[in-house]
Image (cartoon, rainbow, N blue to C red):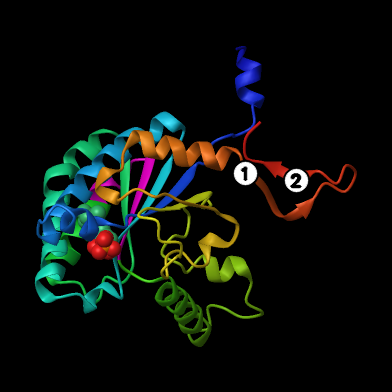
């Protein structure tokens, strides 16, 4: 393939993939194991998936680690999930940093245990210089809460005399915790459930949705490849058609 072909070839695969990592509990229960074992295996699946993503041309992964609704789970499960973040950052941050990964944690910092908020701040600062791959972990995140926070930021700026005029999509988008990330191309949910559960509500506007019948702890390169192949067969129209040919404006894969 000539350099020119490479330079002009259309982007075929998704650049930004978001994952709802569902099914850890069921994976464990089916084996008669405590749910925390499912979550631990879920971290392994996350490691496999992060490792595989760049091979598919993915430059950004956003994963749903803990939602604003997950606080209603039993206290020991909440504490297990917090513990997994501590150990994930503790054991993986150096390697991620060395591989050029920038880590960003989406969601409300307020409300997190103090030590987790500090770990997260440090991890973000330590990887801020990286630009090869963006890993966004949604933690204490809810799509509605994120929109509320973006609106509040605008209101605060307006009250301080720093914003005036009509609100645009760019104004609101700039206040979301995903601001600056590439547009979300593909959202995958595992475990067979077919809903967004308050994940990336704004960012999902033109994303393709793929639902896979696999429990998250079994996820890895093969399943990600399947999801990306399904994405490749979708036509992305962003609401438009080509005015001359009536053909779709963008096709995900050639
Ligand atoms: C859904 O499974 C999964 C979660 C609520 C947590 C996902 C977390 C991880 C994969 C590990 C921790 C994350 C990081 C960032 C280190 P579920 O418990 O709802 O499964 P079920 O629907 O089968 O009960």
Residue at coordinates 61% horizontally, 39% vertically from top-left? 233
- Residue 212's spot in the image, x, y percent? 42, 49
- Residue 189's spot in the image, x, y percent? 41, 55
Report if residue 131 lies within the magenta region.
yes
| Residue denoted by label 1 | 234
Whether residue 101 sits left or right of residue 173 in the image: it is: left
Whether residue 45 sits left or right of residue 154 in the image: it is: left
- Residue 108's spot in the image, x, y percent? 31, 72
| Residue denoted by label 2 | 249
Residue at coordinates 26% horizontally, 72% vertically from top-left? 70
Which residues make up the magenta segment?
Answer: 125-139
Q: Is residue 114 above or below residue 100?
A: below
Query: Which label's residue is closer to the chain start, 2 or 1?
Result: 1
Q: Within 8 Å of ligand 1, the CB of disc 2?
A: no
Q: Is residue 227 above or below residue 207?
A: above
Element on which disc 2 rests: strand
Q: Is residue 82 above or below residue 238?
A: below
Residue at coordinates 20% horizontally, 36% vertically from top-left? 95
């Amino acid at each position: 393939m000539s350099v020119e072909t490479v330079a002009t070839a259309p982007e075929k695969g998704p650049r930004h993939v978001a994952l709802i990592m569902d099914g850890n509990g069921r994976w464990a229960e089916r084996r008669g194991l405590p749910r925390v074992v499912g979550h631990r295996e879920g971290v392994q699946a996350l490691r496999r998936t992060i490792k595989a993503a760049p091979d598919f041309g993915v430059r950004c992964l956003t994963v749903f680690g803990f939602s604003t609704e997950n606080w209603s789970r039993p206290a020991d499960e909440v504490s297990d999930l917090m513990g997994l973040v501590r150990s994930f950052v503790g054991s993986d941050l150096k390697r991620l940093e060395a591989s050029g990964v920038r880590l960003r944690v989406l969601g409300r910092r307020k409300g997190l245990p103090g030590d987790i908020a500090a770990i997260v701040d440090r991890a973000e600062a330590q990887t801020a210089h990286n630009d090869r791959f963006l890993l966004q972990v949604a933690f204490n995140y809810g799509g509605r809460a994120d929109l509320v926070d973006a609106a509040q930021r605008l209101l605060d700026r307006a009250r301080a005399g720093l914003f005036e005029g009509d609100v645009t999509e760019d104004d609101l988008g700039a206040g979301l915790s995903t601001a600056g990330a590439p547009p979300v191309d593909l959202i995958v949910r595992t475990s067979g459930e077919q809903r967004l559960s308050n994940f990336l509500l704004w960012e999902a506007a033109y994303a393709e949705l793929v639902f896979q019948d696999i429990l998250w702890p079994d996820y890895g390169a093969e399943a990600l490849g399947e999801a990306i192949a399904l994405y490749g067969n979708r036509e992305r129209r962003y609401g438009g058609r080509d005015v001359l040919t009536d053909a779709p404006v963008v096709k995900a894969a050639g």
